[in-house]
Image (cartoon, rainbow, N blue to C red):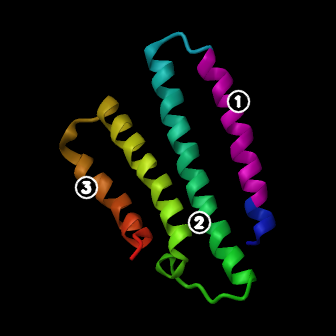
Amino acid sequence: MTCEHTTALFEAIDKLESQLQSVGQEANTQELSLVVQELSWCLATARLGTQILHTLLSERSAGRNINSLCELPDNIRSELRRTLEQIITGHMANWAARNRPGGLKDSVNRLGLLAQQLTTN
């Protein structure tokens, strides 16, 4: 995997977001609006994963031996963490629309493991 691959992934996500936005503008039912919201969340999550991969690849190609997210510079981790917090907020909203609240805490805790790695000193 290279930075060129992640660039192609970003382009694919952009295209899907554009197409989804068009569908969302024509959503005429609450169910369709919710599906668009859920898919938007999926794309935001894919974008974050791609951003993390791109960042790690960029750091390594610049000669920095980065083996974990904790080793990234604070400013990069802060930016990624802010994005993750938005994703967690979206996840909670989507969860509430489809599920009982019982499993939400466990689900959010899984994303919290990533948040811990992105916490700055």
> Does the magenta portion include 86?
no
Q: Which residues are magenta?
A: 7-25
Q: Nearer the viewer, mark 1 or mark 2?
A: 2
As displayed, is residue 57 above or below residue 98?
A: below
Instruction: Give the residue drawn at x 50%, y 76%.
Output: 69
As displayed, is residue 49 above or below residue 58?
A: above
* Left or right of 76 on screen, residue 7: right
Query: CA separation, marks 1 and 2?
Result: 24 Å
Which circle marks residue 106 in the picture? 3
Query: CA separation, marks 1 and 3?
Result: 32 Å
Q: Main secondary structure of the magenta part?
A: helix
- Residue 66 in the image: state x and y as whole percent: 59, 85
Res 106 quadrant in image? bottom left
Instruction: Give the residue drawn at x 38%, y 58%.
Output: 111
> Does the magenta portion include 23?
yes
Q: Secondary structure at mark 2?
A: helix
Residue contact between numbered discs 2 and 3, judged by CB atoms under 8 Å: no
> Is the residue marked by circle 1 packed among few (<14), some (14-19), or many (20+) residues within 10 Å?
few
